[in-house]
Amino acid sequence: EISRNCIVCDGGCGKINPQHRCSRCHLMYYCSKNCQAKHWKTEHRSECMDAEEMRRKDDASTASITTDRVAINTDCAICLNETIDDPLVLDCGHAFCFACMREYQRLSGSLPACPQCRQPNTQDAGLSRVLLVASRAANCKERQPRLDMLQTSLNQIAALLEEGDPHDLRVLFSKAEILIMRGDATEALEVLQNLADLSAEGEKNAAYLTERLDRTKELTEQGQDDAAAQIMEELETFVQAHSVKRVDSLEIKFLMVEAHEAAKQYAAATEVYKSMFMILSPDVGTPVQHRKAFMGISRGFYEIGEYDKAISAGEAALEMNRHFPGAYTYVALSYKAKGDLKMAQTLMNRAVLYTTSWDGTSRQEAYDMWKELTSETAI
């Protein structure tokens, strides 16, 4: 059902409706074997990724896996199902459902310890337990058990903050995530604002510390050892009284946006995205963060009815990466809102073709939306 008349050959010849596709990555399309061979030699060889391998390494967010590892367990310790769905085996030998571990690691923001045996011990065991319960909640389809698990996570976080550092940025970030999952957007935003303030203070303290250490080095090179020693004594006292911990300000803002969107506060979410563009630059922010910002503000503009701006921002994201999950959605919806249903259908057709084949969920969502838009033609 999906047509290729809306895309052009990636070999650079400009022909539409390419009927050949790279059999390894499933992302590039060609009008002929000659164009495919030429593109492989000049460019695609260095970029091509094996679709099956990438399905497991998706976004480098899962722990290291090899297909020849043998699991030492038969049930998933996250969802508690007796049968593991699409097993992911960690270095320690424990296996989990792939979707469960993805959610667990998304919440942790890192490659955390094994949820079952805590090996390797890369993070605080208390927070690891919190994330384990929250991951179970994310995969729970029943409302009340889900809410109960999220409340358990929040109770555990309260204990961690009370017994340990009340300003632990890692714990506060996880608290905000769980509050959003529970639907408490207002409280989540309060936590995130506090987190942003603490992080900004840590950034300021770190800058001061670096400046004084540089000064110490200069004094030592000049032979002024006593003055250098005095600064070091001052810094020892400073470090004991001031935190230099901080969290990526962009990640805090992304979570703020998520809270606003959960509360359907799209104008506020759009303003947060605008503030991101005051920070983002060629040297600041990862490529993924740049794309997420353009995609996010595209949605914000769409939701508040500024369709031309939504299209412009969304197309900027597509220029960066035409395969990025969900990048087409609000561009297509904006064209539809402007009365151009055909363009909306074309965009979602491209989305089905270009969405990475290893991201089955996003690909299905693109297909479902294309199907819905196509059905409107007959109305």
Image (cartoon, grey):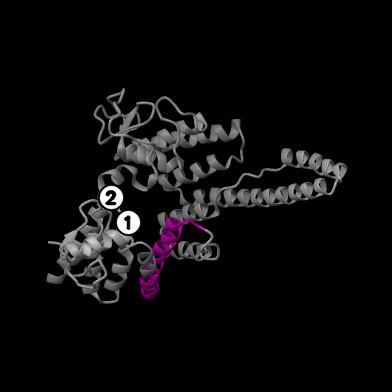
Which residue does the image show at 19% across and 71% down from the upper left?
Answer: 16
Q: Nearer the viewer, residue 117 or 92?
A: 92
Name which residue type carries label 2: Asp
Neighbours of disc 1 within 10 Å: few (<14), some (14-19), many (20+)? many
Which residue does the image show at 64% across and 51% down from the upper left?
Answer: 203
The image quadrant of residue 14 is: bottom left
Give the extent of the magenta segment.
285-313
Left or right relative to 76: residue 296? right
Residue ID for mark 1:
325
Q: Is residue 237 magenta?
A: no
* Quarter placement of the N terminus: bottom left
Q: Is residue 304 magenta?
A: yes
**Residue 140 shows in this picture:** no
Tag 1–tag 2 contact (CB < 8 Å)? yes
Q: Earlier in the sequence, mark 1 or mark 2?
A: 1
Residue ID for mark 2:
359
Which residue does the image show at 32% across and 68% down from the upper left?
Answer: 331
Whole-percent x, y for residue 359 in the image: 28, 50
Q: In what element is the residue under mark 2?
A: loop
Name which residue type carries label 1: Pro
